């Protein structure tokens, strides 16, 4: 399964991706704000085992983020703690390749996964947490339509101390912002929609259209 936008593709991950994940894990600048166990140094074999484990978890879904022009794996994203009863899940993203920071990739990917969660999985609510100092990530979530709910005091331990986290969420009934053009490989690409292949579902509407459908 993969979700294809105009500039990035979200695809399934497998054990062969462990080498790239391992390289990211060695860069403290990349993992300093990660809220998962991946934030700490691990052997490549441990990462391989972790990838196999999460792919078998029925309450989560994880995608690799790839640049369409090069096919290069530049990060990963997905949903965990998926609840069919509450129709909710927790969203996460990590851009491991620093060359793709500050280009709008995180916002665009967040919009793609949010649309997938609401339309394909039938979820009603997505939530996330981020360290309060992770300003770039918080801005990306805001641009993707996520709203602030509050502060989790001293909820994360890093570098010998406890730090606050911000909690954010988005509902399927919320008004969604339009997708903005992003620049990858010095080429501006307009994000006009979403194409979902390898299963029976096609997403042709953007998130703004999804919010309109809830009012009908």
Image (cartoon, rainbow, N blue to C red):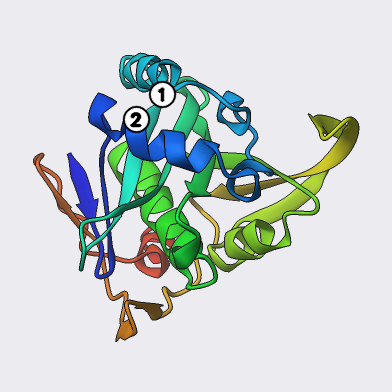
| Helix, strand or loop status at disc 1 | helix
Q: Residue at x 41, y 73 (%)?
A: 179
For the image shown, how many numbered marks are present on the structure?
2
98 versus 58 height, above or below: below
151 versus 145 height, above or below: above
Name the residue that disc number 1 marks.
44
Which quarter of the picture shows residue 203? Answer: bottom left
155 versus 132 height, above or below: above
Q: Is residue 169 visible?
A: yes
First in sequence: mark 2 vs mark 1:
2
Q: Position of residue 133 (x, y in %)?
A: 80, 54
Which quarter of the picture shows residue 118? Answer: top left
Left or right relative to 139: residue 155 = right
- Which quadrant does the N terminus fall into? top left
Q: Residue at x 61, y 56 (%)?
A: 146
The numbered mark at residue 65 is none
Disc 2 vs disc 1: Cβ atoms closer than 8 Å?
A: yes
Mark 2 Cα within 10 Å, few/some/many (few <14, many 20+)? Answer: many
Q: Position of residue 98 (x, y in %)?
A: 50, 60
Q: Position of residue 115 (x, y in %)?
A: 37, 52
- Per the model, the C-alpha gap separating discs 2 and 1 is 6 Å
Left or right relative to 122: residue 173 = right
Q: Residue at x 74, y 53 (%)?
A: 148
Which quarter of the picture shows residue 126? Answer: top right
10 versus 88 height, above or below: below
The numbered mark at residue 18 is 2
Q: Is residue 153 visible?
A: no
Left or right relative to 136: residue 6 = left
- Which quadrant does the C terminus fall into? bottom left
Mark 1 Cα within 10 Å, few/some/many (few <14, many 20+)? Answer: some
Q: Position of residue 144 (x, y in %)?
A: 53, 63
């Amino acid at each position: 399964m993969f979700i294809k936008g105009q500039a990035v593709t979200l695809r399934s991950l497998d054990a062969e991706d462990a080498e790239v994940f391992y390289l990211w894990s060695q860069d403290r600048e990349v993992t300093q704000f990660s809220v998962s166990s991946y934030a700490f140094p691990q052997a490549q074999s441990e990462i391989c085992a972790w990838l196999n484990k999460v792919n078998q978890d029925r309450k989560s879904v994880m995608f690799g983020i790839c640049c369409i022009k090069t096919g290069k794996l530049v990060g990963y994203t997905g949903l965990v703690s998926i609840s069919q009863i509450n129709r909710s899940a927790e969203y996460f993203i990590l851009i491991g390749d620093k060359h793709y920071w500050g280009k709008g990739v995180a916002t665009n990917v967040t919009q793609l996964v949010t649309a997938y969660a609401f339309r394909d999985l039938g979820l009603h609510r997505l939530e996330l947490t981020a360290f309060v100092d992770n300003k770039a990530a918080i801005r990306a979530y805001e641009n993707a339509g996520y709203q602030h709910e509050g502060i989790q005091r001293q909820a994360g331990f890093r570098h010998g101390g406890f730090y606050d986290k911000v909690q954010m969420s988005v509902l399927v009934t919320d008004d969604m912002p339009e997708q903005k053009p992003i620049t990858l490989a010095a080429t501006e690409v307009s994000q006009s929609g979403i194409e979902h292949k390898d299963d029976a579902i096609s997403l042709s509407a953007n998130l703004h259209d999804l919010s309109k459908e809830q009012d009908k």
